[in-house]
């Protein structure tokens, strides 16, 4: 994988559904459904290079060599809490994937992300990891989540989001130049509170109906 890779999934269905999500008129239920639909489409793209091996199977009519996914199970790691909104769709695509979780909060004094929860499957060194969070805003949580996961020496790491700010991409790739990013869109900028503009608001709040 080349360095500092950013893939914008510009499929019309992704773009249309993302626009519906952005609207402040969208209900919580509608937002949640759309997030699942977009995650499915993004997941299709991000899994494009999963390794295959030829195996012998028998159809009702003949024997054949058929491609099947190979290797240890993929690990999906949502960053709590909004990342959880992407998981079910990704599991629909790869039902045998494992799911880890990482939770980070921002220290009010240092403004740095601090881990409060981490649970990953065994044998991480044999696994490909997909870290997911709908919003890549400042990029600090994403970069820290990936740094912690890399302590477990996974075979590969990718990061998937719905929306990215240029500042977030810049920071993320300054720390992890070799971790490829997938997103549905790159927005204009961050505001002074670290929200993506125009963005879609607080993804966790919109997903779970909190304020
Ligand atoms: N997190 C969100 O949920 N939204 C933003 O715009 C930035 C960070």
Image: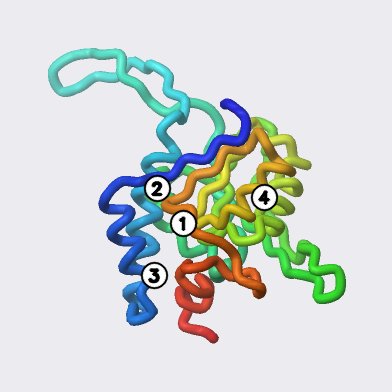
Residue 25 at what x, y percent from top left?
A: 33, 81
Is residue 81 at least partly visible in the picture?
Answer: no
Indicate which label's residue lies in the foreground, 4 or 1: 1
Kindly indicate whether the residue at mark 3 contacts the one at mark 1 (C-beta within 8 angstroms): no
Residue 183 at what x, y percent from top left?
A: 47, 49
Label 1 or label 2, whichever comes before in sequence order: 2
Depth check, front residue: 108 or 122: 108
Looking at the rendered structure, the number of numbered marks drawn on it comes to 4
Label 1 or label 3, whichever comes before in sequence order: 3
At 53% from the left and 27% from the top, the residue drawn is: 71
At 74% from the left and 53% from the top, the residue drawn is: 144
Kindly indicate whether the residue at mark 4 contacts the one at mark 2 (C-beta within 8 angstroms): no
The answer for how far apart the CA atoms under marks 3 and 4 are is 32 Å
The answer for how far apart the CA atoms under marks 3 and 2 are is 17 Å
Find disc 2 in the rendering and name its residue.
42
Label 4 or label 1, whichever comes before in sequence order: 4
Find disc 4 in the rendering and name its residue.
120
The answer for how far apart the CA atoms under marks 2 and 4 are is 23 Å
Find disc 1 in the rendering and name its residue.
162
The answer for how far apart the CA atoms under marks 4 and 1 are is 23 Å
Indicate which label's residue lies in the foreground, 1 or 3: 3
Find disc 3 in the rendering and name its residue.
22
């Amino acid at each position: 994988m080349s360095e500092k890779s950013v893939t914008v999934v510009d499929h019309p269905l992704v773009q249309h559904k993302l626009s519906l999500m952005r609207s402040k008129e969208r209900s919580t239920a509608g937002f949640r459904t759309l997030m699942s639909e977009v995650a499915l489409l993004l997941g299709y793209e991000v899994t494009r290079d999963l390794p295959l091996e030829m195996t012998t199977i028998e159809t009702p009519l003949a024997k054949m060599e058929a491609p099947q996914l190979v290797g240890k199970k993929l690990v999906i790691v949502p960053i709590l809490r909004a990342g959880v909104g992407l998981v079910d769709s990704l599991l629909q695509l790869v039902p045998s994937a494992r799911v880890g979780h990482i939770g980070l909060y921002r220290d009010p004094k240092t403004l740095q992300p601090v881990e409060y929860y981490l649970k990953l499957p065994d044998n991480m060194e044999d696994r490909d990891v997909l870290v997911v969070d709908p919003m890549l805003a400042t990029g600090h949580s994403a970069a820290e989540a990936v740094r912690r996961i890399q302590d477990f020496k996974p075979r590969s790491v990718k990061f998937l989001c719905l929306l990215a700010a240029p500042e977030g991409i810049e920071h993320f790739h300054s720390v992890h130049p070799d971790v490829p990013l997938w997103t549905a869109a790159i927005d204009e900028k961050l505001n002074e509170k670290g929200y993506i503009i125009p963005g879609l608001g607080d993804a966790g709040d919109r997903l779970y109906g909190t304020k």
